């Protein structure tokens, strides 16, 4: 016969495992470019997809609160362009207007809050501007 103490200990262990499995980490999410190559110019639309790595599903309703576009991948981080968010059209896809004045590689750095995730999700997406 199983003692009362053993049943209580087993129940406590199950509850602690169930509680810890409910939370993901910020590293469980990834930003990726919708198009990795874009034509250089002013008012270029750059779109990124935010997905949950474990499920592969898009993350909807994330609040992106910090963005930066620069040419850091080509050693010119000081070449920064303004970034303006655009309305969300597709679930999990976040689009921005920015200037890509010259051909080369640009880095879009993002910080977002995901519902239910206590940590800030950050990501860096490299895109290439072509002539």
Image (cartoon, rainbow, N blue to C red):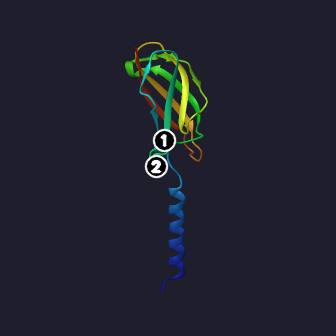
Picture coordinates of residue 90, whole percent (x, y): 55, 36
The kind of secondary structure element at disc 1 is strand
Which numbered dot is residue 89? none
Pointer 1 residue: 51
Q: Nearer the viewer, residue 12 or 25?
A: 25
The residue that appears at 47% across and 20% down in the rendered structure is 70
Label 1–label 2 contact, CB within 8 A? yes
Quarter of the rendering occupied by the C terminus: top left
The kind of secondary structure element at disc 2 is loop
Q: Is residue 42 above or below residue 53?
A: above
Picture coordinates of residue 129, whole percent (x, y): 42, 19
- The image quarter containing residue 115 is top right
Picture coordinates of residue 107, whole percent (x, y): 45, 24
Q: Nearer the viewer, residue 13 or 29?
A: 29
The residue that appears at 52% across and 72% down in the rendered structure is 9
Pointer 2 residue: 55
Q: Is residue 15 shown left or right of residue 77?
A: right
Instruction: Estimate how packed mark 2 is, as few (under 14), some (14 to 19) or many (20 or more) residues with alpha carbons within 10 Å.
Output: few
The residue that appears at 60% across and 40% down in the rendered structure is 61
Q: CA distance from mark 1 to mark 2?
A: 8 Å
Q: How many marks?
A: 2
Instruction: Estimate how packed mark 1 is, as few (under 14), some (14 to 19) or many (20 or more) residues with alpha carbons within 10 Å.
Output: some
């Amino acid at each position: 016969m199983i003692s009362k103490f053993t049943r209580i200990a087993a129940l406590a262990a199950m509850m602690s495992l169930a509680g810890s499995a409910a939370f993901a980490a910020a590293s469980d999410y990834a930003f990726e470019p919708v198009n990795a190559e874009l034509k250089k110019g002013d008012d270029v639309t750059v779109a990124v997809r935010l997905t949950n790595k474990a499920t592969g599903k898009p993350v909807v309703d994330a609040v992106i609160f910090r963005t930066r576009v620069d040419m850091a991948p080509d050693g010119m981080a000081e070449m920064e362009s303004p970034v303006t968010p655009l309305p969300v059209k597709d679930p999990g896809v976040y689009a921005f207007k920015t200037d890509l004045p010259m051909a080369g590689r640009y880095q879009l750095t993002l910080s977002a809050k995901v519902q239910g995730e206590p940590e800030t999700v950050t990501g860096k997406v490299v895109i290439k501007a072509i002539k």
